[in-house]
Image (cartoon, rainbow, N blue to C red):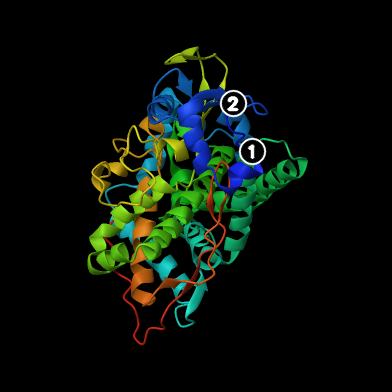
Amino acid sequence: MTGPDILSAEYDADPYPHYETMRTSFPVYVHESTGFYVLSRYRDVVRALQDPPFTNECYTWQIEPVMGDRTLVQMDGREHADNRKMLGGPLRGGDYRDRVVPSVELACAELVDGFRRRGRVELMSEFATWLPINVMASLLGLPAQDRPRFQGWYMAIIAHMVNFGGDPEVEAAGQAARRDMTLFLGPMIEERRARPGQDILSALCTARFAGGPLTDQQIQAHCAALITAGGDTTVSGIANTVKHLLLNPEHLRAVRADRELIDRMHIEAGRLNPPAHLIMRYAAENADLGDHRIPAGSTVACMIGSANRDPARFTAPDTFDPHRPEVDPARDFTPAGSVVTFGRGRHFCLGAALARTTVNVAVNQLLDALPGMRLEADASLRESGIFTRKLVSLPIRFDVATTEPPTERHSA
C-alpha cells in the first residue's frame, strides 16, 4: 500500500481527509507517478523547509524555464542572501507605509467602486483575483491598461509550475508567456535605465549587484517572480478570510467592531486553507526523518495543508479559531511563527508583509463598503488546486451603502 495520490480527482475535490491519512499511516512515502517524497507531519515539513540538506534546487526545472533566469526562490547561501536583500528594500524598507500602502488602498478602492452600488459581487473573479496583480503592476510602474496581459502571464506561469504530468499545451503556454514578457519588458527596462522613477522596476534597473548592474534577463526574471509569487498568496488570503468571517457571524461582528482583529482572522484562515498546499524542496544529501531515509537527489513535497492541521502542533486543528494560543500575528507574518503558510526559515515568503497589508486593506474596505455582507444562498465554496489551491467562486450579497466608504483605514 502507498499514500494518497495527490494528482487524483478525489484529492483535488477535498484533500483534507487525505492529509489525516498521510500523517497517521504514511507520514513519509514516495508518490508513485512523480517520485516525490511526500512529507505531511508538521515537524518533518518544518525541517525540510528550513534545514540542510534540503535546498531549493528543484525550482531549477520547475520555474526557471518560464522565468527566464534564476530567481530568489531557487537560490541558497550567499546568492540567496544578497538577492533577498536587494529585493527586500523595495518590498519593505523604512518608507514602506508611505510608498506601498497608498498603492494598495487605491488599487483596492478602484475595484470596490466597480460593484459596491450593485448589491452583489462574485468576489473571486471581480476582486480577489485582480487585486494583487493590480497592486504589483502599480508598484513595478507597469501600465494599468496592460493588467489583463499580466494576469495571463500569471496564470500561464502558475500552471507551468504544477505541470507535473508534462502536458505539452501547458508547457507551450508557459513558454509563450515568457516570450511575451521579454518583448513587453525589454523596452521598459531600457527606458527605466535612462530615466528611473520611484517604482520597483526602476530600482532593479539601477541596482548594483556583484559589482555591476543586473542584466535585462535578470531584471525580467525578477519581475516575473514578483508578478506571480504573491498572487495566490493574496488571492486566497482575501477570499478565505472573508469566507470564514461570513461562515462565523460572531467573528464577523467582532472584526467589524475591532479592525485590529483582521490579522488574526487572516492568519487563521491561511492556516486552515493555505494558498500553497505544497512547497517543494530538494535533498542535496541523504536525510533521515525518524525511521525514513530521503535519498540524495530526491524531490520532496512538503504538504503545507497537512502540517497546518497537524494535531501534534495545533489544538482542534480543523476548527476556525482566530484566538487560538498557537497563533500570534506579531510572529506569524515572520519566519518565527507557528503556521507554515508563508514557509519557514531563510526562504520565508519575501512578500508576506505585502500580503498582510493587502489583505488588511481589502477586508477593511469590503467591511466599510458592503454593509450586511453575506454569502449567496447557493454558494458552494468549492476549492480547487494541487500545488496552489483557492476557492472557485465566492458569491456575496450585501446592502447598498448610502454613503461613501472611507478608504484610509489600515493597520498592517
- 10 Å crowding of disc 1: few (<14), some (14-19), many (20+): some
In front here: 135 or 334?
Answer: 334
| Residue 102 visible in the picture | no
Question: Which residue occupies the extreme right position in the image?
Answer: 168
Q: Position of residue 48 (x, y in %)?
A: 44, 25
Name the image quarter holding the N terminus: top right
Q: Amino acid at mark 1?
A: Leu
The mark nearer the N terminus, 1 or 2, is 1
* Vertical order, 62 against 134 (above or below): above
Tell me residue 385's x, y (percent): 58, 47
Relative to 325, residue 37 above or below: above
Residue at horizontal 62%, vertical 43%?
10
Q: Is residue 276 in view?
A: yes
Give the residue displayed 68% in from the left and 44% down from the top.
174
Q: Which mark is residue 36?
A: 2
Figure quadrant of residue 41: top left
Which is more toward the observer, 18 or 273? 18
Q: Is residue 10 shown above or below 42?
A: below
Q: Quadrant of the C terminus?
A: bottom left
Residue toward you, 115 or 8: 8
Quarter location, residue 260: bottom left
Residue 81 is tagged as none
Q: Which quadrant of the figure has residue 210?
A: top left
The amino acid type of the residue labelled 2 equals Phe
Q: To which residue does mark 1 refer?
A: 7
Q: Residues within 10 Å of mark 2 (few under 14, many from 20)?
A: some
- Is 185 on the left or on the right of 222, as rendered? right
